[in-house]
Image: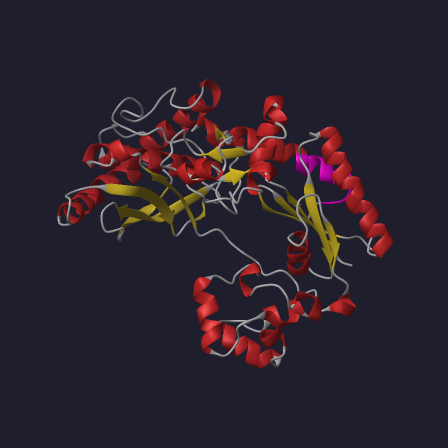
Amino acid sequence: MRWLFLDLNSYFASVEQQLDPALRGKPILVAPVDSDTTVAIAASIEAKRYGISTGTPVWEAKRLCRDLIVTPARHDQYVIFHDAIVAEIWRHIPVTKVCSIDEVACRLLDNENSLEAATALAHRIKAGIRANIGECLTSSVGIAPNRLLAKLASDMQKPDGLIVLHAESLPQRLYDMPLRDICGIGAKMERRLAQDGINDIRQYCERRPRDAGSAWGGTNGDRLWYLLHGVDLPEKATQSRSIGHSHVLSPGKRGVEPVRLTARRLALKATSRLRRKGYRSRLLVLHARFEHDKSSWRASRKLSPTQDSFAVLAALDALFPQLVAAGRARPGDFQIRMIGVTLSEIEPVGAEQASLFGLLDPDDPLARETRTLSLSRAMDRINEKFGRNAVSLGPQSGGRIDRVGTKIAFGRIPDLDEFHE
């Protein structure tokens, strides 16, 4: 036993039930906004018994459960609870990797990798979360020889489960699981494997490692074969290559001006994150999804390495007419369902030197970015102290624009600072 993986059950809905005792024991659906046209981003354990899950349209969920309670998401609270839960786990064992807002992986120490010690540890962690964070916050734990298998084990018994995968039972213990249960196998990969004659985990594992890797494709394609057989491979290093945000617009805000203002707001949020993390970007990407034909659009613009909001907005203003032209060329004129802004080709800023041009006239082109970057940083400090949009570049609220708040994405947990941006 080398890894312990903890997955919080119905996390967003459980936090809502913990915060409001009146919701406990009732079917709860957490939605981005209070509208029947949106979808569930979480469902409580009670709601899941009616067939409601993440992605279920709110209108359909209400049809499935007449007693359903829909509550808007409070992402800042989910981050606060997440931080408290991670701190509680640290009281019992070092946290090796925070995998998502509701998933944590811990490598077991040498005195904890027996079956008895590992299961006792799991029970202590689960009890500590309920006692010190909240009684509604149950979790399912998987224990296995490597992190992937521990993750799979945590999904086998929900809610409040504890499953151990023993090395001697592998990979046969996995044969009843669908391929799609394995992280990294989606619809596209499933089709690729099927074309090579692999339709389930048994067929994959019965191949030789090299043959299984060839079916998977890519560098280290045989890595999954070894993991499913219980080998504890070293983690592959990852590096952030982009920072961005996207937003699905409400039906009445899909015209040119609301989309432009929303794109500006997303660009400002991304650039603020860029500065806070100490990166600069070389490429701005504007992407959108159209309403009528559901098609996607994307365009990019090179940047001089920057973390300045004014420079990014100038590039965005140069790109936006291309989106307007593309939208008006489609049936139904300009109607954008989703708009997104991404800062790519990011790199650490490193040591900075004062600009040679900082003392020139403010309107001198050589001095302008030095001054605007200082102004961008000053805006960060003001918004952190006095709240989101205490100061902004251009209109950020009112009837022309959707509210663009910080949300939790799969695989990325916002810093609390982002709720001030």
Q: Main secondary structure of the magenta part?
A: helix
Quarter of the image for the N terminus: give it. bottom right
Q: Is residue 354 magenta?
A: no
The residue depicted at 33 percent of the width and 33 percent of the height is 265
For the point 27% across and 24% down, which residue is it?
Answer: 395
**Would residue 367 be seen by someone viewing this image from the given angle?**
no
Quick check: can you spot residue 240? yes
How is the protein colored in the picture? Answer: secondary structure
Q: Residue 172 versus residue 360: which sits nearer the camera?
A: 172
**What residue range appears in magenta?**
85-94
- Place of residue 317 in the rendered image (x, y in percent of width and height, measured from the top left): 22, 39
Answer above or below: position of 69 versus 145: above
Q: Residue 161: percent from the left, percent from the top?
A: 71, 47
Name the residue located 72 percent from the left edge and 69 percent from the top edge.
Answer: 170
Left or right relative to 198: residue 227 = right
Nearer-the-camera pick, 370 or 284: 284
Which image quadrant is residue 32 in?
top left
In the picture, residue 25 is in which quadrant? top right
Percent position (x, y) of residue 402? 32, 30
* Left or right of residue 406, residue 162 in this image: right
* Corner quadrant of residue 3: bottom right
Tell me the quadrant of the picture where the C terminus can be found: top left
As drawn, 406 above or below 215? above
Q: Position of residue 95 (x, y in %)?
A: 70, 45
Query: In the image, is residue 158 above or below residue 78?
Result: below
Q: How many marks?
A: 0
Magenta span contains residue 88 = yes
